[in-house]
Image (spheres, rainbow, N blue to C red):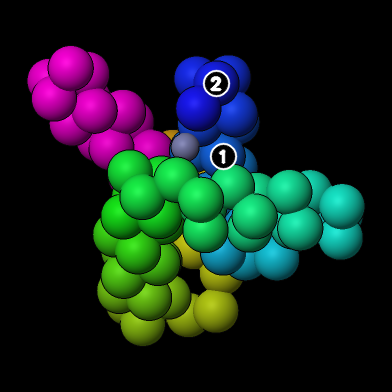
Amino acid sequence: MPKRQCQEALDKLFEFIDGEMSDEDLLRIGAHLKECPPCEAEHEINEKIRLLVSQAHGDKAPHQLRERVLRTLQMARDEYK
Ligand SMILES: [Zn+2]
């Protein structure tokens, strides 16, 4: 699995969950998640976080909070390597 695809999928997970991307991207990321278990797992975690964030802060997560969550996830990934 090319790492570049994983990077793109992981970078766009929040957009994917929010549906804030073109249909083409949605299909591409969705297809990648299906064939890449590590990204799929990451997606499930992000979806749970997104749900918690939306419950706590209304429909849309504040940008700053989203950035913080993304940074935390990135740090967790770096430690995992
Ligand atoms: Zn992947």
Q: Quadrant of residue 70?
A: top left
Near mark 1 (Cα within 10 A), the count class, few <14, some 14-19 or many ≥20, is: many
CA separation, marks 2 and 1?
Answer: 11 Å
Which callout, 2 or 1, points to the residue nearer the camera? Answer: 2
Near mark 2 (Cα within 10 A), the count class, few <14, some 14-19 or many ≥20, is: few
- Front in this rendered view, residue 59 or 76: 76
Sequence-wise, which precedes: disc 2 or disc 1?
A: 2
Q: Which residue is mark 1?
A: 9
Residues tagged 2 and 1 counted as in contact (Cβ below 8 A): no
Q: Which residue is mark 2?
A: 2
Task: Please identify the quadrant where the C terminus is shown.
Answer: top left
Q: Secondary structure at mark 1?
A: helix
The x, y position of residue 38, in whole percent, is 33, 43
Q: Ligand 1 within 8 A of label 1's CB?
A: yes
The x, y position of residue 78, in whole percent, is 22, 18
The x, y position of residue 32, in whole percent, is 59, 47
The residue at the point 56 percent across, 64 percent down is 17
Indicate left or right for 67 with 59 as reference: left
Q: Residue flagged by tag 1: what amino acid is it?
A: Ala
Residue 73 is inside the magenta segment: yes
Q: Residue flagged by tag 2: what amino acid is it?
A: Pro
Magenta segment boundaries in residue numbering: 69-81
